[in-house]
Image (tube, helix red, strand yellow):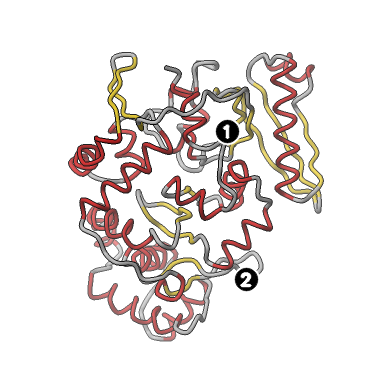
Amino acid sequence: MDIASERLARSFLVGSPWKTARHLVRALSAVQAQDYEGAKWAISQRTSLNEEAIEREFTNGAILRTHVLRPTWHFVDPADIRWMLKLTAPRIMTIMSSYDRQLNLDDKVYRRGIAVITKALRDNNYLTRTELKAVLTKAKFGSLPGERLARLVMRAELDAVICSGPRRGKQFTYALLDERAPAVKPRDRDADLEDLTLRYFRGRSPATAHDYAWWSGLAMRDVKRGIDIASPHLEQVTIDEKTYWRAKDSPDPPASSAHLLPNYDEFFIGYRDRSAIGKRLRSVSAVTGGSTLIAHVLVVDGQLVGGWKRRFDGERITIEASVLTRLSPGERKRLVEATRAFQEFALREVRVTGLSARAAAKSA
């Protein structure tokens, strides 16, 4: 079994049936989105939607952006946001409690601050983080350096009080979750665990229990419980003496493909062990650095072959590719086609450097 090839199909990078951002995000459970522009491109590669179409779904609340799972920014379906937070937020708050003490943030302080935020956002009054700071300062909340404000806002997200509102130009706003997402009938914890577990493995398998724990932020006991509940729909396989789980349905083998993947794409960010995509380069350093070090990467047939950067030059975007291995003419052609897909997504002229035969030979 080729792990990377199956993951290509599972993660909808090839043969995707989805036509909307919401349906895609729901199928993957969540799409990591701290790099907002990169996350939209990740969605586009699986839906063929351009940037404006994805932005409309975000503006209309068809997808929401919040801190959930590990936690970091993710796009989620409004129908899923509450049960995902109920499942994952308590562990995150426990882990981060030591930081709260350093910042003099306790439950009493959080309750007061969140009450001020709730009142300020009522009746679809979307506010930026800077505007929320001004509201809190006016309410005599106390000192709000950047980290303390960030923790307060994140706690309001984890408590399922606020989430993303529509962007105001390029600025992000916050909204009350109750005004952006419909109420859903609560389920018991096992039902939530089964749902999250099945969606993870259907969208990313084969994967290990440790991969799932990394992605979800769940304690290993919950990971094992989720796998146990979902086991009628999963199968256990051993690859190179490691135990993997995969959804029982078998995806069609992916056709030859090439992708310009953003820095936090679910194809690799969804795993603790990312070695499956580094066989060709004999390295996965490009996708295992700290959060500020992970680069946009070039992938051919599920394998890393280099990296890329985007540069905005007025109305034009320049893509600077860096190929780290020898490519066949067909592989270079597929990567060039991937840059054309980026142009259709961005709705701008795109200039590409680094994908010529000469550049590839020089990098090899």
Instruction: Please report the residue visible at 49 percent of the width from the left and 50 percent of the height from the top.
Output: 25
- Specify few, some or many for label 1: CA neighbours under 10 Å numbering under 14, 14-19, or 20 or more: many
Q: Which residue is mark 1?
A: 14
| Location of residue 37 in the rendering, given as x and y in whole percent from the top left corner | 61, 51
Please give the name of the residue rendered at 44% of the width and 64% of the height, measured from the top-left corner.
146
Displayed quadrant of residue 297:
top right
SS label for mark 2: loop
Q: Position of residue 276 (x, y in %)?
A: 45, 22
The answer to which of 133 and 33 lies nearer the viewer is 33
Residue 313's x, y, as percent? 79, 49
Q: Which residue is mark 2?
A: 168
* Amino acid type indicated by mark 2: Arg
Quadrant holding the N terminus: top left
Point out residue 100 in the picture as x, y percentages from the top left corner.
27, 61
Q: Secondary structure at mark 1?
A: loop
In the foreground, 217 or 77: 77
Type of residue at label 1?
Val
Count the marks: 2
Q: Which residue is at 36% across, 78% downward?
A: 142
In this rendering, the answer to whether 347 lies above or below 292 is below
In the image, which disc is placed on residue 224? none
**Vertical placement of residue 60 versus 45, above or below:** below
Disc with the residue nearer the chain's start (2 vs 1): 1
* Residue under the point 58% across and 61% down: 57
Residue 278 vs 286, above or below: the answer is: above
Figure quadrant of residue 199: top left
In which quadrant will I find the C terminus?
A: top right
In this image, 336 relative to 184: left or right? right
Q: Residues at badges 2 and 1 in contact (C-beta under 8 Å)?
A: no
